[in-house]
Amino acid sequence: MSDDQFRDMIAAEAAERVLTEGEQGGEGDPLSWFRRSPVHIAEYLGMAKLSADLAQLAREIDEPVEKLVADVRDDSNIVDMPARDLRGPAVGARGVARPRLVHAALAVAIAAIVAVGIGVVLNSPSSDQALRYTTGHGEERTIRLADGTFVHLNTDSALAVRFGREVRLVELERGEAYFEVAKAPSRPFRVGVGAAELQDVGTAFDVFRGDGGSVVTVAEGRVGVFATTSGAGPGSASSTLSTRLAELSAGEQASVSASGAITARTTADLNRVLAWTRQQIVFDRESIGDVVAEFNRYNDVPITVRDRRIAAIAISGEFRARDERAFVSFLGKLPGVRTDESDGTIVVSAKRK
């Protein structure tokens, strides 16, 4: 990332620390973050001052914060100002009444806080608004949420995030995501997948959601799997957890049906499950048909298997996810397998005798 993006990331983390002062108990050494770089200290002090200034300005006006945020979002209220005006008295400002100046300064402060993702108002527990992240075909992205959690979003995936003061809510709408959850024991992290939710306070786990259900794999820590009860659907601010279906430990995997029932529980091959985070595809005694489907998730040139007997052959290997040519070359060397390319499609079939 660029220097500006890196600085913005640190600023967002500093802002989160200012707002959650005293809630970092599960982190270990509370000063370790500050020791990593002088930039961390500078950004923290800047955010602490901004927070104090905002509190002081808020005491000087009687308009609700919600109205101020609405004013900030209204394009008609945006006025171009030189950058220097934000650091000192504006030219010709003597004739402006102090309440108006205070109102403008508070609006600027709120806009700055919303920009770095603190979410003072928007992330309140009662808010129905959500941040949504998506990836297209063959696209992957890594997102750093406001609490410090990292989400690695796989191809063709969609994620909605709603953070409140007491709980962090995420809905995996489709696709796959790997969560590295920031520790916050007083604010659980919940991921909705159909009629079930996963709850965690600080660990790492992978979730794949397809049409028929979801697969949950725990890499570190423990994750609880719950059924949900709510008319609003899982992952929403009004959803509540009911029956605990299972508690998974590191290295365990569970399959959850679309109706919210656990259909399988087993020990996971973490190297295979998490291979996509390294942009690889790893398979062990899996059918050609299943492996081809996985390659098609990442590549623009589709692979089609036209013979059921070939599709059922079990194979093992490890390839780069976007190197379908190497995979096709591997298939072409198998006994009885033939590969051809026609009209932008790679066809796998039985070799003619």
Image: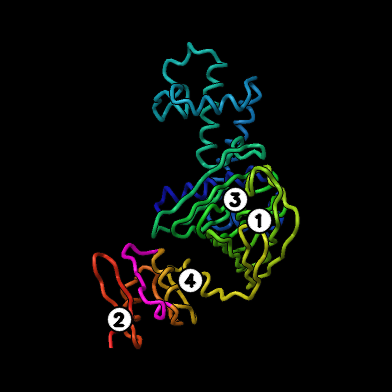
Residue 338 numbered mark, or none: 2
Magenta extent: 298-311
| Mark 4 neighbour density, 10 Å: few (under 14) some (14–19) many (20 or more) | some
The three-letter code of the residue at mark 2 reads Arg
Q: Seen in the image, is 14 located left or right of residue 345?
A: right
Q: Is residue 12 above or below residue 122?
A: below
Residue 2: x and y, percent? 39, 52
Frontmost of labels 1 and 3 is 1
Q: How many marks?
A: 4
Q: Which residue is mark 1?
A: 196
Q: Residue at x 57, y 35 (%)?
A: 50
Quote the CA–CA distance across marks 1 and 4: 25 Å
Which quadrant of the figure contains the N terminus?
A: bottom left
Quote the CA–CA distance across marks 3 and 4: 23 Å
Q: Which residue is mark 3?
A: 170
Residue 141: x and y, percent? 45, 56
| Mark 2 neighbour density, 10 Å: few (under 14) some (14–19) many (20 or more) | some
Discs 1, 4 touching: Cβ within 8 Å: no
